[in-house]
């Protein structure tokens, strides 16, 4: 998109100089950021891995201290394909998750409260609640469940992959009265992902597809508007993830 006069609000430095620089001399307790849709639609998720941490570090440089920075992971939006596929929306969520490697950052996922047809979903109450939890942990150091399950490691067990998580609260929760787990995909050595049944085994999830004899990778909630139903007992949804390396 050409950056003419009509697009001045998104020109480099305009928002910062107009809205942030004037308040930089003031002390702040923290910042909340809810953005990323335009980067996803423009297929700039790889760039976002650099831009977003750079923004946080730049703000901290101007403030002169490590301002706690909380952000919202993109909600579901847009249609899904019938089979597992690549999605820039999922890639952008991954870039957001990577930013948690910076100290004093926290993320509230909105993966389960999106709207396929509305880029601005109406449920802001849950978003606010999850930001409060992130702030309680990140800013005030409270000992509480502040995140849904986070992918920790995978182990191949024959034609199955066992997934371990952190941030369990007191355990995993499947939101299905029959215990069916949704949202998982599995790939063999060819890297082609297919839908995968999954079962809860204690605090682990075991993923499989009988057609994939030597699985190599798993993805969860990897689409525009996912319908995964994996939570922890604090009623916080699992963070979307992939076990293979991110695209370059």
Image (spheres, rainbow, N blue to C red):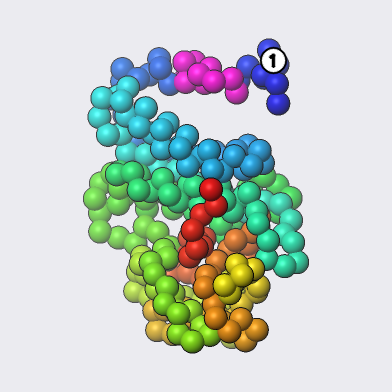
- Report the residue that reaches farthest toward the front: 190
Is 61 a magenta residue?
Answer: no
Residue 223 percent location from the top left of the image:
64, 59
The percent position of residue 64, horizontal first and vertical second, equals 26, 25
Location of residue 176 in the rendering, given as x and y in whole percent from the top left corner: 58, 78
**Eyeballing the image, is 55 above or below 176?**
above
Res 142 visible? yes
Above or below: residue 203 compared with residue 152 = below
Q: Residue, x 58% and y 84% (percent of image)?
A: 213
Q: Please state the extent of the stretch shown in magenta in the rendering.
A: 10-19
Q: Is residue 117 left or right of residue 182?
A: right
In depth, the one of 142 and 187 nearer the eye is 187
The answer to whether residue 209 shows anywhere in this view is no
Write the residue at 37% across / 27% down: 58
> For this rendering, which residue is in front, 47 or 176?
47
Residue 219 is left or right of residue 170, and the answer is right
Residue carrying label 1: 4
Closer to the camera in the image, 109 or 129: 109
Q: Residue at x 64, y 42 (%)?
A: 43
Q: Is residue 129 above or below residue 41?
A: below
- In front of the other: 98 or 146: 98
- Residue 135, above or below 64: below
On screen, residue 189 versus residue 29, left or right, reads right
Q: Is residue 13 magenta?
A: yes
Tag 1 secondary structure:
loop
Location of the N terminus (image quadrant) = top right
């Amino acid at each position: 998109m050409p950056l003419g006069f009509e697009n001045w609000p998104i020109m480099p430095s305009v928002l910062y100089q107009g809205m942030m620089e004037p308040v930089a001399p003031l002390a702040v307790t923290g910042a909340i950021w809810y953005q990323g849709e335009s980067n996803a639609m423009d297929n700039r998720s790889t760039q976002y891995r650099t831009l977003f941490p750079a923004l946080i570090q730049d703000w901290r440089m101007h403030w002169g201290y490590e301002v706690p920075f909380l952000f919202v992971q993109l909600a579901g939006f847009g249609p899904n394909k019938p089979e597992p596929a690549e999605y820039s929306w999922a890639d952008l969520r991954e870039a957001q998750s990577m930013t948690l490697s910076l100290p004093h950052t926290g993320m509230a996922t909105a993966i389960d409260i999106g709207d396929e047809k509305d880029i601005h979903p109406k449920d802001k109450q849950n978003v606010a609640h999850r930001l409060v939890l992130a702030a309680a942990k990140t800013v005030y150091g409270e000992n509480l469940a502040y995140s849904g399950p986070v992918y920790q490691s995978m182990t191949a067990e024959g034609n199955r992959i066992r997934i371990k998580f952190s941030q369990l609260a007191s355990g995993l929760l499947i939101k299905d009265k029959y215990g069916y787990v949704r949202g998982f995909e599995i790939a063999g050595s060819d890297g082609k992902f297919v839908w995968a049944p999954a079962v809860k085994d204690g605090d682990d999830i075991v993923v499989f597809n009988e057609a994939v004899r030597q699985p190599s990778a798993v993805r969860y909630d990897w689409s525009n508007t996912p319908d995964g139903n994996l939570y922890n007992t604090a009623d916080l949804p699992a963070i979307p993830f992939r076990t293979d390396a991110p695209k370059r």
